[in-house]
Amino acid sequence: MSTAAVARRYAAALADVVLERGESREVQEELIYWERMIQGNELLQEAFGNPTIPFERKLRVLEDLVTRTKVRQTTGNFLRLLLKNQRLMALPDITRKLAELLDERMGLVGAHVVAARDVPESVREALKKKLMAVTGKEIRLSFATDESLIGGLVARIGSTIYDSSIRNQLQLLEEKLASD
């Protein structure tokens, strides 16, 4: 089974549970913390990713970390399930898919905006309103910077891209001039 299919199945099951219990954002934040903790530590990657290490040793490490991080019962149980099914190293994909599913179920649409410079809060709010009008849905914005855009911004909502960057306008002008 592909990694995407695995991530979708686990994320969908977890989304059902956390929405029912009203702890979706908390569990999501805890899983993101765990994802970063594992990815940032080579020993943990080796411990959880090495198939030659016995399950009991992995479980002891996991239980110790669950106790130390004081995660919710739902999060701890989910991490144990992933370990038992040898899917703990798929946590980044599962966490990403969980975020998508939770947004979808709550009627949110994620929009990623890349700008040449930091975007002031007033512009962020205006952009959010404009994108909400275009999509007809509540928008969750994330921002990044890329100086190569020169100016303007590029917004991605799903597979749709809105590119108002100066770099893009210059490319379009160059293509037009080349065809004349």
Image (cartoon, rainbow, N blue to C red):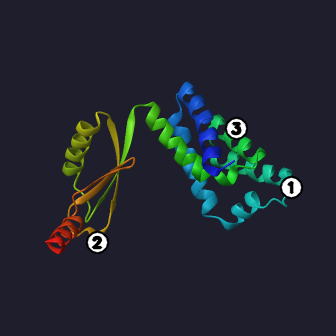
Q: Is residue 142 above or below residue 23?
A: below
Q: Position of residue 38 (x, y in %)?
A: 64, 58
Horizontal placement of 79 versus 118: left or right?
right
Q: Residue at x 44, y 37 (%)?
A: 103
Q: CA distance from mark 2 to mark 3?
A: 45 Å
The residue type indicated by label 1 comes to Pro
Return the mark for residue 145.
none
Residue type for callout 3: Asn
Q: Position of residue 12 (x, y in %)?
A: 59, 35
Which dot marks residue 148?
2
Q: Nearer the viewer, mark 2 or mark 1?
A: 2
The type of residue carrying mark 2 is: Ser
Mark 1 highlights which residue? 54
Q: Earlier in the sequence, mark 2 or mark 3?
A: 3
Task: Looking at this view, name the residue that lies furthest to the top.
Answer: 20
The structure residue drawn at horizontal position 67% and vertical position 55%, both measured from the top left corner, is 89
Q: Is residue 26 above or below residue 1?
A: above
